[in-house]
Amino acid sequence: MFFRHALLPDGWAQNVRVAIKEGIITGVETGVSAPQTGRIALPGMPNLHSHAFQRGIAGLTEHRGGGGTESFWTWRDVMYRFALRMSPEDVEIVATQAFIEMLEGGFTAVAEFHYLHHAPDGTQYADIAEMAARIGAAAQATGIDLLLLPVFYAHAGFGGKPPAPAQRRFINNLDSYNRIFERCGEISAAGIAPHSLRAVTPDELAALTTLAGAQTKLHIHISEQTAEVDECLAWSGARPIAWLLDHAPVDKNWCLVHATHADAAERAGMLASNAVVGLCPITEANLGDGIFPAHRYAGPIGIGSDSNVLIGAAEELRMLEYSLRLAARQRNVLATSSIHDTATAMFLKAVSGGAQAIGIAGGMAGGISPGAPASFFTLEGENPEIALAQAVFSARSPQVKDVWVRGRQCIAEGRHRLAGSAREKFDAVVQKLLE
């Protein structure tokens, strides 16, 4: 496969030939003699945090209620009501639409933080991982790489507070969770996800880390909201990230999702642990969470689409950079001393951090390099830096042309083969759930 330009781990290269066998890159040659045609290739972006079912409520919560200030917590109430109505078939249809949009937006792998486990009344399905299997079916149909993260959710607040009725579809004990996790491993690559420090007790968190062992990926929501920080301080006397670093073996296999309100000491602790900070800039802006100071953090970071209110790798990077510009009142905040082009610097950092967080078999951290999955997408243009910068900062619509996942082409000329039929089914599900 030939590309006029390609973004390799050490930067842009021209006239690149990529050899592929069984979905894995076996060789990369640069400066090859070839016709002066071909597109610009970039490594597929890992999406390190998604709640696929929430794609169904995108646009439905953008109005002020009559109860005063709107926040994450009022949004969550709407999300709970929607989640309580979804059937397994609904979840598969909504996830299929979300995964198609991810692929069309340059994401080639997704870590699905899956907590909608049980029937609407809270009882278990005959297949305890029925809902996870629906996520797996959507990934299989669309072609996206999947890390399935069944979520352990047992409590409504710090200190083991009993769960609320609206959370009944999420709730497990350690025994039922173990069975879900084992079943998820039969569906796809799987990791472990304590929902948050609010939703697990210290003993439960310790049991989950033991279950994970030395290799399994662990993802957790942490320090997303100031109210969460305040409640953790009241419960333990420590801030959430500080408490986690002191009580869990946080290392490179962990992804700390959001980490929005980490203070300087917590950021230093995360850096020392080599855990990935999982940023979801569009959702964090949509929910009014706050801004993680990524320009002051040298550790690994990646991006995710979280609530899937708007899906696209370029859009997440744009929101990240622009939020930091507003906070710092500077431009080109995430450019580096070695990579002056902001879009290129952000892209490479997010690919590397996302790859570490997802860790799909075969490895993704190398991007377009031997041994990595043949997962990449293309843009058009003569100058690759300008083409990427335009895609991130000035495109009115996604600029992605073609997408391959493990050597299989999933997107051709910007469109997935299932896009039309999937959208019709998705629209019908949303309309049904609104009735």
Image (cartoon, rainbow, N blue to C red):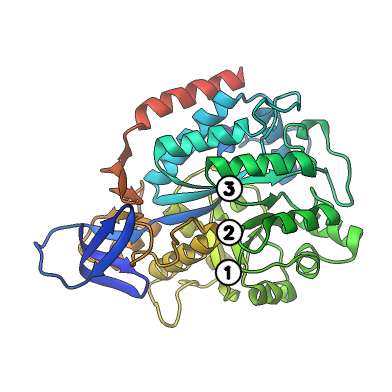
Q: Is residue 83 above or below residue 47?
A: above
Q: Earlier in the sequence, mark 1 or mark 2?
A: 2
- Asked if residue 62 is positioned above or below residue 201 in the image, the reply reads above
Q: Which x, y percent locates residue 382?
A: 20, 63
* Residue type for callout 1: Ala
Residue 294: mark in rendering: 1
Location of mark 3 (residue) = 306
Q: 256 and 321: which one is in front? A: 256
SS at mark 3 in the image: loop
Disc number lying in front (3 or 1):
3
**Residue type, numbered disc 2:** Leu
Q: Which percent across, then down, holds residue 64?
A: 68, 36
Q: What residue lies at 58% left-to-right and 69% top-to-bottom?
A: 294
Question: Which numbered tag is attached to residue 365?
Answer: none
| Residue 216 image offset from top left, x and y in percent | 62, 58
Asked if the residue under mark 2 is in contact with the one under mark 1, i.e. CB atoms within 8 Å, the reply is yes
N-terminal of the two: label 2 or label 3? 2
Q: Earlier in the sequence, mark 3 or mark 1?
A: 1
